[in-house]
Amino acid sequence: ISVHNSASTTVSTAKIQSDFLDEVIRGLSASPKFLSSKYFYDELGDNLFQYIMNCEEYYPYRCELEIFQQHAPEIVAQITKSSAAIDLIELGPGDCSKSIYLLKQLTQDQVKFTYLPIDISTNVITFIEKNLPQAIPGINVQGLNGDYFDMLEKLSAHSGNKKVILFMGSNLGNMSPVDAIDFCRRLRRILAPGDQLILGMDLKKEPKEILAAYNDKGGLTKAFNLNLLKRINRELGADFQIGSFTHFPSYDPITGACRSYLISMDDQIVNIEGLEIGFKKHEAIYMEISQKYNAGEIDELAEISGFIPERKFHDSRSWFTDAIWVAV
Ligand code: AVI
């Protein structure tokens, strides 16, 4: 199933397409040029991301899976302290392959909870509502199809239960550090004191390991980036020559910013909706940030956004962390 499939949503397709066009034109008219990685996830992009998660070099998925396999009992203990019932809200649940360990543990410990996955993709929500009760009989699942914050607003009036938000997969890393603070503050405003956030984040580590994860030998990450140009050709009628762009990832061990670029290999002109966009030879399009943090930076992010860091869980190599924060 697709994790980020924006094709099937309650918002009108025409609106999505005009937002897509506006953002593409804005990004390619800017200096330096940029495109938003949120558009990576069309059907082919979803499939490529599934392959990336399973490729040898891309460690974050396996690290976080290990955390949930190994530490579910302690995570459950941390989120059920002093609360009779909880609403467990997952942002971007995918196929629940990691959160299922938490859901099984909550069920086994006979905790009263409702699982509320939120996703922009109807496919994701339909898949979960159909399949999760087969894996965990008796589970109370209420899928929410839409934008994270629209759905969270709706939920804030929903029940008096304690809320625990799950935001995993280092998805926060796809925001700049400034945008990440805004996002966490927005989450905080929706929560009440005592509610919790479980945040999965990739950690700073040996730079070569990070770079390799975004430059796999099989060329999946390259294809994932180039796929956005293909999508622009297909959906917006552009004429990118895909073969004349190459993928370039970089990692700055000081800031923790891992960035991907596409580089134009020639002077060339690309037409989009009657607009001519010129590229100089070796000009870059900034495609994606996958920000890496250290433990102290994650604690600072908690505090600056109105949370207190409570606990952190790591995989055996301490490459990835799931931090639990409590709203103050
Ligand atoms: C979804 N996100 C956390 C992935 C990441 O690691 O930034 C997307 C990705 N981009 C290239 N490989 C994986």
Image (spheres, rainbow, N blue to C red):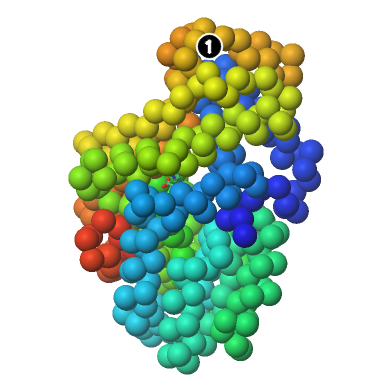
Q: Quadrant of residue 295?
A: bottom left
Q: Residue furthest front?
A: 218
- Toward the viewer: 179 or 141? 141
- Toward the viewer: 163 or 192? 163
**Residue 284, image x and y in percent?**
45, 20
Above or below — where is 106 with respect to 17? below
**Residue 252, image x and y in percent?**
26, 34
Residue at disc 1, CB closer than 8 Å to ligand 1? no
Q: What residue is at 41 percent from the left and 37 percent from the top?
A: 289
Above or below — where is 33 with respect to 84? above
Residue 248 appears in the figure: yes
**Residue 63, image x and y in percent?**
33, 61
Give the side of residue 158 with respect to residue 285, left or right. right
Quadrant assignment for the N terminus: bottom right
Q: Quadrant of residue 94?
A: bottom right
Quadrant assignment for the C terminus: bottom left
Residue 186 appears in the figure: no
- Toward the viewer: 155 or 99? 99
Give the side of residue 70 with respect to residue 197, left or right. left
What's under tag 1, amino acid-wise?
Answer: Phe
Mark 1, secondary structure of its residue: strand
- Toward the viewer: 267 or 14? 267
Give the side of residue 179 with respect to residue 250, left or right. right
Q: What residue is at 66 percent from the left and 11 percent from the top?
A: 276
Above or below — where is 244 with respect to 224? above
10 Å crowding of disc 1: few (<14), some (14-19), many (20+): some
**Residue 251, image x and y in percent?**
29, 35
Query: Badge 1 is on which residue?
Result: 279
- The total of numbered circles placed on residues is 1
Q: What residue is at 66 percent from the left and 67 percent from the top?
A: 127
Q: What residue is at 69 percent from the left and 22 percent from the top?
A: 238
